[in-house]
Amino acid sequence: MKILIADKFEQSGRDGLQALGCEISFQPDLKDEALIEAIKKEQPDVLIVRGTRVTEPMLAAGPLKLVVRAGAGYNTIDVAAASGRGIYVANCPGKNSIAVAELAFALILALDRRVADNVIALRAGEWNKKEFSKARGLFGRTLGLVGVGKIGQEMIPRARAFGMPVVAWSRSLTPEKAEQLGVERKETPVDVARAADIVSVHVALKPDTRMLIGTEFFAAMKKGSYFINTSRGETVDQAALVAAIHARDIRAGLDVFGNEPTSAVGDFEDPIANETRVYGTHHIGASTDQAQEAIAAETVRIVKSFKETGHVPNVVNLAQHTPATHRLVVRHRDRPGVLAQVLDAIKAEQINVQEMENIVFEGAEAAVARINLDKAPSGSTLDRLRDGNQDVIELNLLTLQ
């Protein structure tokens, strides 16, 4: 199996892939046209990336079967184009959760104690204890979480260690789960903004989370409160954030921005970087040695499973719902040609198979096939399949709800 790694990737991961017998091409600086040409030249089965954008022309440039995002998100990959070509897309969720939570708390502490401003003043030869000794402190302050996935959940024990109560919202957060996590559940993100002294955003970038945090949210925040975003820049209306910084004395700690460079090194001309109440980092939330080693190990696990079994862990682009309306259940003897006859009959009626599995019983004498179809076969076809093959033990047609 040929693998093209088009981004930074830990040596332990490269060693692990080679131990699987994979042929590795490690070209961490590839992007855009250079990546397209590399795919054409290398003809890889698997493409591994971190922040590198993967576009439809890249997916079309070679015989790719699997794209692995060595990280939690996958918004930099054209998932729709991959799905159209039958290319698996997988990621490594949860492996960087602790690293991102640590950075989120670093930004909270840095904002409260104005750490960056302290450093800048000292480097300029200034001593200003009078100015920098003003801090609110975190004990007893309410932390609000927008998103309570793996990273959001890592924020909770860290807040507890600082003596901070937590309020939270997530589409998946039930009252029972909130009680289990020890947080107060809110009905909407705006309710979180209204209740919190510090808000931290931890949602994946999806169509329904793009610009999730906007003018109404910032208007609900307490004056002088802190806003942290270590998720994706596009989840926040950045213009509304800047307006709130000026109108409501909001202070922001940002690891992500709406207009980030596509490369690891480049110019950054976003005016928000010049806001004195903004502390920014360079989208480094997942960039600890611990997180990258864990992500590398998970990437190796994904490739190993795909290579040895055809199964892809953490796949993100399989259909949750298909056009299937009926399921044909065929209990049959485990003999050659039984299912071929069934499929030929289905094909003759121009019926499409949406999903299919065949489960073999112990001893390999009998099996059950479950075949999801986009319409029901005719009664005559079903009768012919029941009566025309002695290896078909039983055949039933179910209507899917």
Image (tube, rainbow, N blue to C red):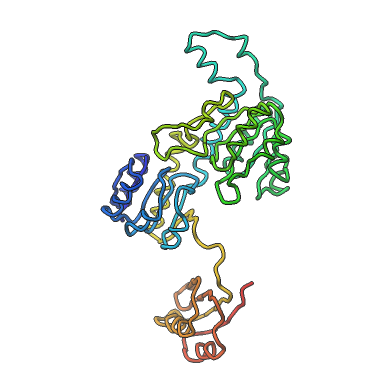
- Residue at 55%, 71% (x, y): give it: 323
Estimate the x, y position of residue 99 in percent, counting from the top left.
Answer: 51, 35
Of 119 and 94, the residue lying toward us: 119
Estimate the x, y position of residue 72 in percent, counting from the top left.
Answer: 49, 45
- Determine the image quadrant of residue 129: top right
In the image, is residue 364 above or below residue 227?
A: below
- Determine the image quadrant of residue 263: top left
Is the N terminus in the top left, top right, bottom left or bottom right quadrant? bottom left
Of 28 and 289, the residue lying toward us: 28
Estimate the x, y position of residue 49 in percent, counting from the top left.
Answer: 39, 46
Count of residue discs: 0
In the image, is residue 24 above or below residue 230?
A: below
- Determine the image quadrant of residue 394: bottom right
- Residue at 50%, 80% (x, y): give it: 351
- Residue at 44%, 43% (x, y): give it: 295
Left or right for 328, reference 250: left
Estimate the x, y position of residue 100 in percent, counting from the top left.
Answer: 53, 36
